[in-house]
Image (spheres, grey):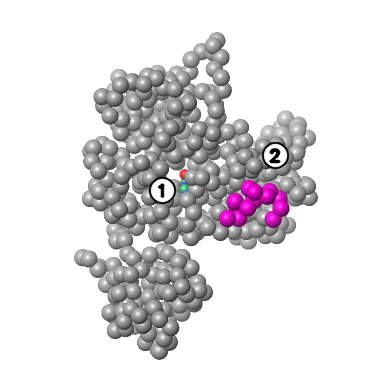
Amino acid sequence: MDLATLWAGMLEQLKKVLPKPIYETWFVSSLIPTSYENDVLVLAAAQKFVCNFVNKNYADQLNEAAEAVTGRPTTVKLEDMNAPAAEPAKPAETDDLYKDTLFSDEDLPKAPPKKKAEPEPKAVMVKEANESISPPPEEPTTEDNLIPNYTFDNFIVGNSNRIAYSIAASVAEAPAKKYNPLYIYGGSGLGKTHLMHAIGHQILKNFPHMRLRCITSEDFVNDFIQAIQDKNTENFRQQYRNIDVLLVDDIQFLGQGDKDSSKEEFFHTFNKLYQGQKQMVFTSDRPPLDIKSLEDRLRSRFQSGTVTGIEPPDLETRTAILRTWAQKEKINIDKDAINYIAANVSDNIRDLYGAYNNVLSMASIEKNDVTLSLTQRALKYLVAEKEEKKYITIDEITSSVCRFYSVNYNELMGKKRTKNIALARQVAMYLCRELTGNTYPHIGTAFSGRDHTTVMHACEKITKMMNDSDTFKEMIERLKEKILDVDK
Ligand SMILES: Nc1ncnc2c1ncn2[C@@H]1O[C@H](COP(=O)(O)OP(=O)(O)OP(=O)(O)O)[C@@H](O)[C@H]1O
C-alpha cells in the first residue's frame, strides 16, 4: 500500500472517531505522512508540540486507524521536522512536554496515574525524544469535554470577533448575570467553538464549584435517544438539569430530522435552566431566525438573550493571528511571507492554520528560512485554484483613487464635500472594504477617524450606483484592476 492511500484511509477512520475540531486541527492540518516501510508509518509535524500533543492524547486512535487500513500490526512514528538530527536523546518526561508550546500545562489534560498491572498501550514514537511514550488512555478533551487549548489566552482578538470576545469574557466573569442565553453565530472555522470552550475554561477557573456540561446538539439528541432506549430518562434529566452552565455547539442541528421528542426535551431543559438562572451558551452557523427547522418558541428564546456574530477575519486580524502564532512558537517568519499568507487565505482561521503549517513544513523539509518565495511555493496548492491575491493596503487604494479622480490626499481625507471629492472618498471607502476586507470601523478610523456608519453608507451608495449604471460599474472595475496591478 502506498503512503498516500494509507494516510487517506487513516484520515477517514480518524474522522469517524474524533471530534471535528480535533480531527481538523491536529490531524488534517498538522501531520504530513513522510514514509511507510516495513510496517512503520512516519508522520511529520512542523512543531514539536504537535508531536507531543498527538502522542499524548491520540496514540491509540492513530495505531488503530493504521491497523484498520493496513490490516496488519503497524507502528506509527511521529517526527518533529525541526528536531536537530544530532540532538541527544532526552527522556520524555510528560511534565516537560509542553514547555515552549502554545499551551500552558494546566490547559492540558492530565494523565491519570498509570497502574502497574495494566498492559502497556501500543506506543507512538516521538523521534526527537528517541523513545516511545505510553499514551495515557484518556479522552481527547477534559472531563468537562472542553478542548484544552481553546482558552481565552489562545484566542486572538481582532475587529471581526472583538464584540463576541468581550461578551464571552463578561459571561465567564459573571455567569447568568447579564448575557443569558448567549448565542454565538458565524461561518465555519471562525472560532465559535473556541470561544465557547474558552468561556467554559474560564468559568471553571473563576468558579471551580460550578457544574458545567459542554456538548454538541448531536450529543444531546444521542444521549436522549440512549436514555429512552435504556428507560432511564430520569437520569438523563438529572444530568442535564442539575448543572450551572450548559454549552451547546452547533445548535442548528437540533432542529433537523424527525426528532420532535428530543426538541421537546431540549425545550424543557432550556426552560428549567433558564428559570434556575443558569448560564447557557449556544453556537451556530447562522442566526436564530435563519434556523428554519427550529420551533418558534425555541427560536424566540434564543433571540431573547444575547445574539452575537463572528465575522470572517479581516486582513489585519489574519496578519495578527499569524504573527502571534509565530511569536508564541518563536519562529522567524519574513513579514512579506506573513502578509502573503494573510492575503491569500481569507475564509477562515482553520484554513489559515493549515496554510501556516504547510509553510512551516516546507521550510523544515528544505531546511530554509520562511521567505516570501518559499511561502508562495508552499501555498501553490490553494492559490493556484483562485487568483493569487496581492497584499493591498489602504494607502495603495487611496493613492490610486486620488490619481484617478485628480484629488489630493488631504482633500480625500478632509471634510470638503464638493461633488468630485465626496465621490472619490466614497469610492475609496468602498474599495477598501472590497479589497482589504477590513471592517467598517477600521476603515472609518483610517479615513481621519470617521464613524463606521459613514463607511457603511459609502459602500451602500457605491454598490447602488454600480447596480444602476453599467458605465459606472465598469469604471469601478477598471479602477479595481489598476489597484490590484500596482506592482505588476
Ligand atoms: N481568534 C482566534 N484566535 C486563535 N485561534 C482561533 C481563533 N478563531 C479560531 N481559531 C482556531 O481556528 C480553528 C477553528 O475554530 P473553531 O473550531 O472554533 O471554529 P468554528 O467557528 O466553531 O467552526 P465550525 O462551525 O466549523 O465548527 C480552531 O483551531 C481555533 O482554535
Q: Decide which of 83, 230 is in the foreground and name it.
A: 83
- The reply to whether the residue tagged 2 has its Cβ within 8 angstroms of ligand 1 is no
Q: Does residue 89 lie above or below 400 as drawn? A: above
Q: Residue at x 40, y 89 (%)?
A: 418
State which tag comes first along the sequence, 2 or 1: 2
What amino acid type is highlighted by mark number 2?
Answer: Met
Q: Residue at x 29, y 58 (%)?
A: 388
Q: Does residue 251 lie above or below 80 as drawn? A: below
Which residue, given by chain and number where applicable, does mark 1 sit on?
324
Structural crowding at the residue carrying mark 2, measured as other residues with C-alpha within 10 Å and reported as few (<14), some (14–19) or many (≥20): few
The N terminus - image quarter: top left
Q: Residue 94 at what x, y percent from top left?
A: 46, 24
Q: Quadrant of residue 185?
A: bottom right
Q: Residue 213 at what x, y percent from top left?
A: 66, 39
Q: Residue furthest top?
A: 117
User: Helix or strand or loop: what does disc 1 sit on?
Assistant: helix
The residues tagged by marks 2 and 1 sit, at their Cα atoms, a distance apart of 32 Å
- The reply to whether the residue tagged 1 has its Cβ within 8 angstroms of ligand 1 is yes
Q: Which residues are magenta?
A: 166-178
Residue 148 shows which numbered tag? none
Q: Residue at x 71, y 50 (%)?
A: 176
What amino acid type is highlighted by mark number 1?
Answer: Thr
Q: Residue at x 33, y 42 (%)?
A: 331
Which residue, given by chain and number where applicable, does mark 2 sit on?
210
Q: Is residue 83 magenta?
A: no
Q: Residue 464 at what x, y percent from top left?
A: 45, 79
Q: Main secondary structure of the magenta part?
A: helix
Count the labels in the image: 2
User: Helix or strand or loop: what does disc 2 sit on?
Assistant: loop
Structural crowding at the residue carrying mark 1, measured as other residues with C-alpha within 10 Å and reported as few (<14), some (14–19) or many (≥20): some
Can residue 216 be seen here? The reply is: no
